[in-house]
Amino acid sequence: MFDIKVDHVSKRYIIRNNSRSRSIGWPEFAFFGKRPTEIWALNDVSFEAERGESLGIVGNNGAGKSTLLKLLARISAPTNGEIRIRGRLSALVEVGSGFHPDLTGRENIFLNGSMLGMTRSEIGRKVESIVEFAGVSEYIDVPVKRYSAGMYVRLGFSIAAHLDPDILLLDEVLAVGDIVFQAKCLNVISQLRESGRTIVLISHDLGAIQRLCDRAILLHHGKVVTTGTPANVIEHYQHMAMGNQDAYRLDSDSHESTAWCSRISFASAVPGENPRTGYPMIARFGFCTKAHLENVVFTILVYWPSGYLCAQLTTAVSDPHLRIAPGSGEVEFYCPVLEIQPGWYRVDVAIESNGRDIDRQQRCAVLHVRPGKMVFGDFFMDAEWRIHSCS
Amino acid sequence: MEPNHPSKSTESDLPTAPGEKSLLEESKVSQERKDRLLDSRLVARESVTVIRPPSFSLGAILSGVKTLVGYRDLLYTLTLFRLVIRYKQSVLGWIWAILQPLLTMMVYTFVFSRVANIKSEGMPYTLFVFSGLLPWLFFSSAVSNAISGLVGYSHLLTKLHFPREIIPLSYVLASLVDFGIACIILSGLMVCYRVPISWKILDALPVIVILVGFTSAIALFLSSIQVRIRDIAVVLPVLLQVGVFVTPVVYSINAVPARFHHLYLLNPIASLIENFRRVVLLGVGPDISMLVSSGAITLCCLFLAYGFFKATEATMADVI
C-alpha cells in the first residue's frame, strides 16, 4: 500500500527576465518588457513511498528537491502529472516560519498550529506538552519578537513535532539549531519512524539520510537518476558530485619544482580490486626528485566530495627526518584496516621539505572505497570480542 | 547470560557480498515496524488526496469549500489575531474602532450637509450618512486590507499549505467585527436622535449576509490578481474613492434619475446600502426586488471569484 504516489510529475517555472537592454527613452511597462524563460524544475518524475517507509531525497542544489517537496506539501501545484497522498501529511519546510512577531508564544502556538491543520481543541490539549518540549515555559506569554533565535526554532519544531501526521516531510530541518536541539530532532524523527509514519527527508546531510532512511532517490536536473538503498544512492550521488573523473589527474609533467609526485594509486590487498572498508588497503605514492632533500614529508589527504578533510596518510608522524636522494622512488602506505566508510573521495598529495611545500597537487586522484565490513556509522572500528559467562 | 545475538559478531573475513546480512536485518526491523503500524493505524484516516495541475472546475470549488470548512479554526484564529495585532502598540487601542467611523461621519456630515447641502429624505443627515457609511466602510476596508494580505503573508505562502482564501477572508471577517462595533454606535446615535428602534431591524440580517458575500467575492478576486499584478493595490484607492459617489452613501437613491435606477442598482453595493438604510432608519422591511437581484448577482460573483481563486491558488507560491 502506498502513502505517496508521484506519477509522471513535471513542474515548469516561468522566469521573467528583469534585465532590459534599453533603459533610456520611453518608460517601458514592466509587465510587457520582460521576456519569459521556461525552467523545468521537475521533469517526468515518478516514484512511490510505501506506508511506514522513510524515503531520503538527495541531489545537488537545483536538482528539484525543494520543488518536489513543495508539490508534495501542496504549497505549489504540478504542471503535469498527478500526486496521490494517503492520510494526513505535514511538511516541515522551515520551522517557526508561521510566527507573528507581535503575538505571544501561546498565541503563536494556536496560530501556527491551526495553519498546520490542527483544530483549536487539539492545540488546547497539546499546548502544555508543546511548551514543555520547547523549554520556553517561562516566556510563553511574551511576544515572540523578544525570543532568542534558538527559542524561536525550538518552539516551531515543538509545534510541528506534536502534529501527529501520517506522513512527515522534512527539508533540511536538521541543519538549524544547536547540537542538543539537533539530537532532540533526530530523536523525534526516529520515534515517528518507529511508530510507522511515512517520512520523506530531504537533506544534504548524507549521514542522516543513511541513518534515517530505508530507501533513497537521487534527483539530478529534475529527473530521478537512481533509486535504491541509501548506501547505493549516496555512492552514486558522491560519484556524480565528483564531476568528470578525467579532471582528477596528476600533473606529473611540470618539472619546475625539485621534486614532484609522479604517481598515486590505491589498491586492496587482493590485486586488481578497489579498497574495501574494514579490509587492508595499500596506497602507493610515486615521486621524482632532482636534488638531495632533507626532512621530507609525504602526505596523502583524503576529502569527502563536500570538501571536508576526512583522513590523511603521512610519513611525518613516524619519521619527520626523512632524506631522499635524486631519482625516482615510491612510498608505500599499508593500512591494515581501512576505517573510512564506502564512497568516493577526492585526494590531494603533498611533498614537503623542511616545512615548505615542494609539491602540492589538489584534486589529483579519486579514491573509491567499496562496501566492506561496515554496517552503520561514520567509521569502522575494528574490534575483537568475547563473551564472559556470568553464571 | 546467554549470547543471544550471535549474528552481531564480527563478520567473516570473506570479502564477498558483505552487505547481505545487514540488509536482511534491516528488512526484519522494517517488517516489525509495519506490523506495529497495521495494528495501530490501519483504521485511521484513509482519505486519499489527489494533487493535479490547477484548473477552474466545479469539483475544485466543492472540494475547496469542504477543505475550508475543515480549516474553520484557522479562519477564526487568524481573524482573532488580525483584531489583536491591529491595535497593538497604539495608545488609543480599541477606541480607534469607534473613532474611525465617527470621524469619517463628521467630515462627511460637514462637507455634504453644511457645504454641499444634500437632501436626506427628512432624516437627520448625521444618521442618514452614517447608516450609508457603515456598509460602505465595511466593504472598502475589507477589500483594501484583503488585497495586500496575501502579498504580506508571502513568507507563509511559500512555506506552508493551507487554504489561501483564509487570508483575505480573515480580513473580511475582521472588518465585519468593526462593522458590528459601528452598528452599536449607530444605534446609540439613533437613540440620541429619538429614532425608534424596533424588532424590524433584524430584517437587516439578510442584507448584511449578502453584503459579506459580495465583499468576499471582490476580496478573493482582487487579491488573487494582486499576487500576480501588483497594480491592483495602486488602482484600488482611486476606484474606492469613485465608489463612494456611485453608491448612495452621501446622497439618497432618489437623487438619481429614475431611468438610470436599473443600471444603478446592478451594483449590489448600491442596492445593499439603500436596503440597509431603509431597514435601519425607516423601520420597514427590505425592498425585496433589490434584495433578490443583489443576492443573485452576489451568488454569481462569489461562485466565479472562488473558482478563479481556487484555480490560481495553487501557483501563488511560484509567482509571489
Image (cartoon, coloured by chain):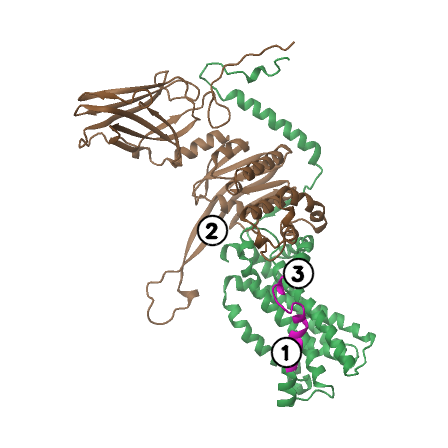
Chain colours: A brown, B green
- Same chain? Circles 1 and 2: no
In the image, what residue occupies the spot 72% across and 69% down?
B180
Q: Is residue B248 visible?
A: no
Secondary-structure class at tag 2: strand
Choose mark 2 or mark 3, whichever is in front. Answer: 3
- The amino acid pointed to by label 1 is Thr
Q: Which residue is mark 1?
A: B104
- The amino acid pointed to by label 2 is Arg
Using residue A344 as the reference point, say whether residue A350 is left or right of it. left
**Residue A155 image point, x, y percent:** 60, 46
Q: Which chain contains the residue that carries disc 2?
A: A
Q: Residue furthest right?
A: B199
Are discs 1 and 3 less than 8 Å apart at CB?
no
Secondary-structure class at tag 1: helix
Specify start and end residues of the magenta stretch as a single range.
B84-106
The main secondary structure of the magenta stretch is: helix
- Is residue A384 within the magenta segment? no
- The amino acid pointed to by label 3 is Thr
**Residue A309 image point, x, y percent:** 38, 32
Of callouts 1 and 3, the N-terminal one: 3
How far is mark 1 from mark 2, CA to CA? Answer: 49 Å
How far is mark 2 from mark 3, CA to CA? Answer: 35 Å
Using residue A4 as the reference point, say whether residue A384 is left or right of it. left
Q: Which chain contains the residue that carries disc 3?
A: B
Q: Which residue is mark 2?
A: A12
Q: For residue B79, which numbered disc appears in the image?
A: 3
Q: Quadrant of the N terminus of chain A?
A: top right
